[in-house]
Image (cartoon, rainbow, N blue to C red):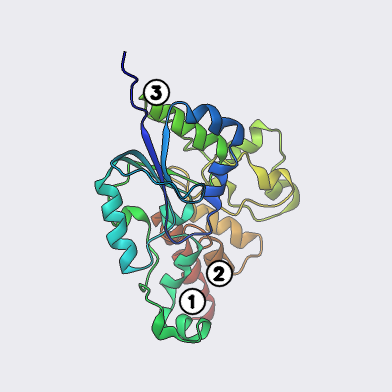
Amino acid sequence: MAETARPKLAVWKFASCDGCQLTLLDCEDELLPLGEHVEIAHFLEASSAVVEGPYDVSLVEGSVTTQTDVERIHRIREQSGMLVTIGACANAGGVQALRNFADVQEFRSVVYARPEYVATLAESTPISAHVQVDLELPGCPIDRRQLIGVLTAVLAGRRPGLPVHSVCQECKLRGTACVTVAQGIPCLGPVTRAGCGALCPAYGRGCYGCFGPMAQPNTAAMVASLRSLGMSPADVARVFRTFHAAKPEFRAAAEQGEQGEQGEHG
């Protein structure tokens, strides 16, 4: 009997720190059995060996920041059966999307000795702004348990299940006291998607939203809460732009924070 071909998996990098790819590499014990069921055909972080597409599943890390990126993501989409974006950069532009709110030419002139040699777009945009994305895996970086869960679900032919509730529920599940109620620490947990295991609150610091907005977050109430804890309008805008500046929910919250600053100085 002929052996059934294993599904081809490809991992691609755009503008990013490589943290999400490293999370995949960190799944050492899980990668070995996974390798028996899937062929890792393109993953330059792990190997220079490349198998030509098409690919059954593509994992894409990083945001689109150059015209070359725009052209490349379209080629990847064409040869990918399922395209999964991994991490804040691919899902929402990442930290580099801070350029979207300033003059990128000024940044370029300050950072680079020969800025004319640096080709870049004015904005850092998520992958979904350019091609159809089948699934977004949140986090900065992503959670290894969620990553393995997604890959095994795809191999089993079912839709992966990802949480849409907030970090607050994870705090309750692990018995962590609310850092805002108990210590008056600003925390984005009430509007941030679960998946990290409420790691930051467990160590006595507020959630800073690295998993992006939960489903239907009440960001207006969150902004009011942060202001009541003594945060300035500028700081409120900043915390919502750290990782997921391009997400509509957090973008609106940042703009609400800025409007508060205008009101104070109006």
Query: In the visual, does 236 lie left or right of 57?
Result: right
Pinpoint residue 187: horizontal percent, then vertical percent.
63, 52
- Name the amino acid, label 2: Pro
Which residue appears at 74% of the width and 49% of the height? 204
Which residue appears at 53% of the width and 62% of the height? 242
- Tags 2 and 1 touching, CB below 8 Å: yes
Q: In the picture shown, does residue 155 fall above or below 250?
A: above
Task: Give the mark nearer the N terminus: 2 vs 1.
Answer: 2
Q: CA distance from mark 3 to mark 1?
A: 52 Å
Pinpoint residue 41: horizontal percent, then vertical percent.
40, 41
Comparing labels 3 and 1, the label whose residue is closer to the camera: 3
Q: Residues within 10 Å of mark 3 (few under 14, many from 20)?
A: few
Image disc number at residue 4: none
Q: Residues within 10 Å of mark 2 (few under 14, many from 20)?
A: many
Return the residue at label 3: 156
Q: Secondary structure at mark 2?
A: helix
Pinpoint residue 151: horizontal percent, then vertical percent.
45, 33
Query: In the visual, does 179 lie left or right of 215?
Result: right
Q: CA distance from mark 2 to mark 1?
A: 9 Å
Return the residue at label 2: 233
Name the foreground residue: 220 vs 85: 85
Name the foreground residue: 56 vs 171: 56
- Name the amino acid, label 3: Ala
Q: In the picture shown, does residue 203 fall above or below 185?
A: above
- Tags 2 and 3 touching, CB below 8 Å: no
| Quadrant, the N terminus | top left
Q: CA distance from mark 2 to mark 3?
A: 47 Å
Image disc number at residue 262: 1
Q: Secondary structure at mark 3?
A: helix
- Name the amino acid, label 1: Gln
